[in-house]
Amino acid sequence: MATESWTTRGLRDWMRGFLQQKGIESAPVCTDLLLAHVAGCERMHLYMEPERPWTADELATLRALVTRAGRHEPVQFLVGSWGFHAADFEVAPCTLIPRPSTEALVDAALAWIAQQPIGSVRSAIDLGTGTGCIALSILRALRGRQRKGRVLARAMHPEFPEAQSGDESDGAEATRAEPPTGRAPSSDVDALPSFVLTDLVPEAIELARRNAERHGLADRCSFRVGDAWSAVGHADGVFDLVVSNPPYISDAEFAELAPNVAEWEPRTALHGGADGLDVVERIVQGSMARMRPGALLLVEIAASQERAAVELARSCGFLEPFVLRDSDDLPRVLRAVTPA
């Protein structure tokens, strides 16, 4: 790729062809993401200025990224962040890239919390947090509900106190996750729970910490390094909500993973043993002793593990376990509650 007279249109055409030759999935999307990242603009802006000339420095940066993309390095790692549940999270090769299927777990947690008495969900834990996207998305949405509740309360009761300043981007989550209904206005609307975030990989914990700071939620989070429940001490008490997206890929399924997953995302965050259930079993079996009566457990699983996961939860004493479906209509999230 020469450095003279390159425009956005020309770069897009060349990059798409190059990446397609390398067997990169979604080469057009990858192309636009890299162009927008280097140009420092939104993807739509690329189409508004197709004849924009590119500088030598921009081309050098882009060349290095395209070379890496051609080796199947995920574009998410190349641009350094990725969207999940209406927010951007920093990503890195130390842990999994957030995926849309996991949003079903977040939505299930929010739906359950909306049905509980205000302030009753006080403590939660995210086992194997990775980027922190699950815990932080739940907290962001609840913060959005707080703000929406305060606006409604002020409209009905002028004496209601003003909302605290903060990240106003949470309005999307407030709309997406229906707020509780039929409740009297309160100056303590839906207090945010405290979240413990654990991960086996220290670098992942530091990544989750940065994401918590990025979204103004570090004061609601504490961080632990360790494998599943081994990272939690007695001082952490018991929890109202347990969420996890553990490694659950079986030997057979791991062999079929695309190169951009198998070769770049960490095996420790993907592979769950011969049947994929090694870590899932440890989480579910250890949960009952660390949860309050009537607490909720949500664990992401493979679609092929639906029956085994339900039987596991039932054998551990959970009530009415079942598996929720994701945005692709695949069995994805084990849902179970402790006896009241």
Image: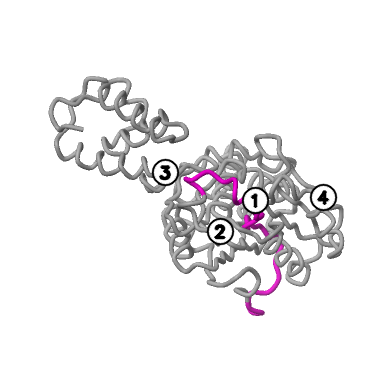
Q: Amino acid at mark 1?
A: Ser
The residue under the point 78% across, 48% down is 306
**Which mark is on residue 186?**
1
In magenta stretch: residue 1: no
* Sooner in the amino-acid sequence: mark 3 or mark 2: 3
Q: Position of residue 52 (x, y in %)?
A: 21, 24
Q: Which residues are magenta?
A: 233-261
* Sooner in the amino-acid sequence: mark 4 or mark 2: 2
Q: Position of residue 256 (x, y in %)?
A: 59, 45
Say which residue label 3 marks.
72
Compared with 320, 44 (above or below) is above
Quarter holding residue 42: top left
Q: Nearer the viewer, mark 1 or mark 4?
A: 4
Residue 165 or residue 23, whichever sits in front? 23
Q: Amino acid at mark 2?
A: Ala
Quarter holding residue 88: top left
Crowdedness of circle 1 by 10 Å Cα count: few (<14), some, many (20+)? some
* Sooner in the amino-acid sequence: mark 4 or mark 3: 3
Name the side, left or right, on which 25 lies relative to 8: right
Residue 194 or residue 92, whichever sits in front? 92
For the residues bearing labels 2 and 1, Cβ distance under 8 angstroms: no
The residue under the point 46% across, 31% down is 26
The residue under the point 63% across, 75% down is 230
* Sooner in the amino-acid sequence: mark 2 or mark 1: 1
Say which residue label 4 marks.
307
Say which residue label 2 marks.
269
Q: Amino acid at mark 4?
A: Arg
Q: Which image quadrant: the N terminus?
A: top left
Quarter holding residue 227: bottom right
Question: What is the number of callouts on the image?
Answer: 4
Name the side, left or right, on which 97 lies relative to 64: right
Seen as rendered, the residue at the extreme bottom is: 234
